[in-house]
Image: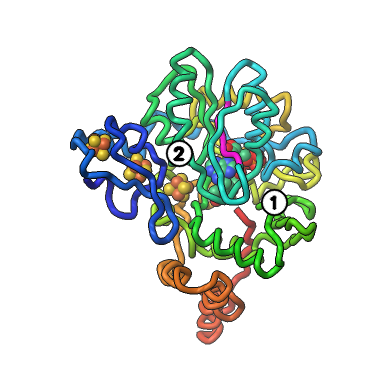
Amino acid sequence: MKICAKGHCTGCGLCKEVCPVSAISMERDRFGFVVPVVDENKCIKCGLCSKKCIAEGYERDNKADRVLAASLKDTSELKKVSSGGAFWAIAKSFIKEGGVVYGAVAKDIYTVKHMRAETIGEAEHMRRSKYLQSDITECYKQAKDDLEKGKRVLFSGTPCQIAALYSFAGENDGLFTCEIVCHGVPSALVYEKYIKELEEKNNSKVVDIVFRNKDYGWGKNHYEITFDNGERILEPSVENAFHSSYLAGMISRQSCNECRFVNLPRTADIVLADYWQYKGELLEKSEGLGVSLLVCTTDKGNLLVEKAEEYLYLEDSILDEALRSCRHLSHTPGKSIYREMFLEDIANRTFASTWKRYMSNGNKPADICNKIIRRLGYEKKRRTDKTD
Ligand SMILES: Cc1cc2nc3c(=O)[nH]c(=O)nc-3n(C[C@H](O)[C@H](O)[C@H](O)COP(=O)(O)OP(=O)(O)OC[C@H]3O[C@@H](n4cnc5c(N)ncnc54)[C@H](O)[C@@H]3O)c2cc1C
Ligand code: SF4
Ligand code: SF4
Ligand code: SF4
């Protein structure tokens, strides 16, 4: 039983949830990405999994209506979020009015799962970008149950997860959604190798990881890795071996390389991103700790922002500027031409030696391109690259 075209699967697990005879399990492929596996002995060929599958995209009747820059008024809270904290303001105001919120939570250093929160305390764990694929499967039914009981639900996640939720639960007056602009999700296998080798090198277990520490400010994101022996690595995210491989398009899912959820007006009621190129007053007000880019695509999106205003500095912006600032608002993340080689190699080599082969100075694809450009007599323009 083939559910979707090869390489298009996002790993959302929706097919597993809808199968009436529990014939589908989610398992890892050899590159470390979760994919559905069908037990042919159980399958009754009903076709429901393919019918509901969102691998080819999902359409809603929305339009990019209002574009805003936003930043949490409370700067101490800004340090606890990755961008300008728009999600946190929306989530808090939603819970205050009696709603329930779903979002991604780091269960331990290896596992990210979607969870349900009824209180602000529970929702706190959803803050911050976790650059790993979140397991959403248990939340489809939970969210649908909540809606059927008449509860208001705010569901956040990657665009493909939001599409999968709509495919599962359908449109509902009580359902509100927000999606993050998404550079893709990396291979869990590569991440695990990276962590294990760090532990061996430091002779101590990794006990905590913050993918975007803001000690040096929002524009200078750092990876913060804490070991059991108390030692701590704090390095610019763009220089971190794992994150630089991710940014270079070496280790993301195949579906992310041609993501089918990037086209505006996109899927969720609100789209959230970093407003890297923002130049206005919020930079000062936020003390350089983060400005979110928000695109409201429905009336519900506008309502969410209105309700969250008590926690946010807001400034209207325009779509052209948003598109200039945020490439992944309208473009797929893309991939390195070395992606498959990198992933094949990692199965047989250490992360460190694979990284050295493809990413260390002089070897990484960008350096090779620069060398060729220089040899041809052109000077390459420098691009300020933030960390996504
Ligand atoms: C995998 C990934 C890729 C990203 N790619 C881009 C990008 O290309 N460009 C860009 O501008 N920004 C990117 N971001 C950052 C994202 O834009 C910010 O997290 C977002 O703007 C929200 O910021 P915030 O300050 O409002 O909330 P924060 O508190 O920083 O983030 C919390 C929100 O992120 C969600 N979230 C966190 N981790 C995950 C996860 N693993 N899976 C699903 N949802 C998650 C939570 O559910 C919650 O809604 C990415 C984040 C992630 C996790
Ligand atoms: S995209 Fe989701 S629903 Fe479709 S095959 Fe993959 S896991 Fe199943
Ligand atoms: S065709 Fe029906 S029974 Fe078979 S795996 Fe898909 S949903 Fe399950
Ligand atoms: S890049 Fe696209 S397919 Fe990949 S996780 Fe993000 S939304 Fe899903």
Quarter where residue 306 is shown: top right
Residue at x-position 66% and y-position 23%: 119
Position in image of residue 262 (x %, y %): 44, 45
Q: Residue furthest top?
A: 150
Please name the residue shown 46% across and 18% down the image: 147
Q: Position of residue 265 (x, y in %)?
A: 45, 37
Q: Reply yes or no: does residue 103 show up in magenta.
A: yes
Which residue is more in the foreground, 96 or 179?
A: 96
Residue for badge 2:
161
Which type of secondary structure does the marked residue at label 2 adopt? helix
In the foreground, 67 or 261: 261
* Amino acid bearing label 1: Asp
| Residue interval drawn in magenta | 101-105
Q: Nearer the viewer, residue 22 or 288?
A: 22
Write down the residue under mark 1: 208
Residue in view at x 27 percent, y 50 percent: 5
- Three-letter residue code for mark 2: Gln
